[in-house]
Amino acid sequence: MIEQTQMDHSLLNISQSSRQMILPILVLYNVTLESSTTFQTFITSARYGGLDPTLIAVYDNSPVSHVNSGEEAHLFAYKHDPSNGGIAAAYNWALGIARSHGYSWLLLLDQDSSLPITFQAFVSEAVRLYSTNNSVVAIVPRVTDRGGAISPKRVRFGRLAPLPEPGPQVADYEVAAINSGTVVKVSFVESLGGFNQAYWLDCLDHWLFRQIYAHGKKVALSASVLEHNLAGSDYRNQISLVRYESILSAEELFVTTEKRRAEILVYIIRLMARALKQLVIYRRPELAELTCTKVIKMIKYGA
């Protein structure tokens, strides 16, 4: 109990010294703050870490605002975008706020993550540790979905592989991670011209971490673990045709602009395997048809 109390006080002191360096940005779509798992666990985590739970920017992509005036008054910043500019628009909006208010890091948050109570304390500790390290421009937690590890991953030829165990504090190889829970250095994103709006919703995370590697920068791994609902991976029930078309388009853009010809060929093979699984296992022939159409289109890139 004494050791735990000492650790709690240590994290609290670190959080207090780092609080002005991080701006959290939460993106909503047809979800209220009350029903957002991320927002509710953010508040708990902030209070545990001795941070101000109102220090969060919220970007609402819903057709109708899901944040009332009373809630808005308790947010650092709020924007309703009924045209749905996606996560790229939200992150670029927060990037501008961070620049004007002197924040050095952005904490990217989706609406359906569950942050552990120590999350923000550990984030603050990591930011304090790496703020003067010019090579580290992103800090990522370990992320699980229904018990399975989904992020971060090591980028291998044509695929994503689990990180080696035990994982390093700073990866000396290419890493890919999901947006939610990632802390990224403001100055680095600004050097890229902001978040790439071509990836307005999907594959923005792949693009960001590809840029980190391409520019010779590094990713640090946080000690924190969060749970995230990766709805886009549920080909059996949750994903719609429109949503899946968006994912395929973003994948095409990323693979054809960021990958070599041999890796494009591997992607085509993986698409064919995906189509077979969608048809036989998930019983979603409409998804399989879209995937096969994309295979035909992609062949010209791999030829």
Image: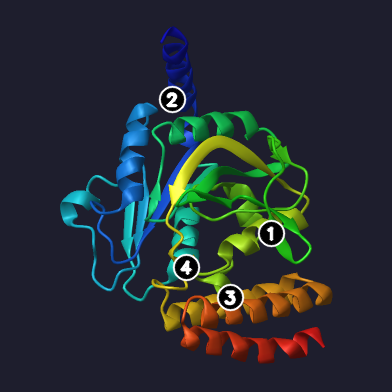
Name the image colouring. Answer: rainbow
Gap between marks 1 and 2 measured at Cα: 36 Å
Gap between marks 4 and 2 measured at Cα: 36 Å
Amino acid carrying label 3: it is Ala
Amino acid carrying label 2: it is Gln
* Mark 4 lies on residue: 232
* Mark 3 lies on residue: 250
Q: Which mark is residue 16?
A: 2
Amino acid carrying label 1: it is Leu
Residue 214 appears left or right of 98: right
Q: Which mark is residue 141?
A: none
Q: Residues within 10 Å of mark 4 (few under 14, many from 20)?
A: some
Callout 1 secondary element: strand
Residue ID at (55%, 55%): 178
Q: Nearer the viewer, mark 1 or mark 2?
A: 1
Gap between marks 4 and 1 measured at Cα: 17 Å
- Measuring from the top left, give residue 10's x and y in whole percent: 48, 17
- Measuring from the top left, give residue 12's x and y in whole percent: 43, 22
Q: Earlier in the sequence, mark 1 or mark 2?
A: 2
* Mark 1 lies on residue: 160
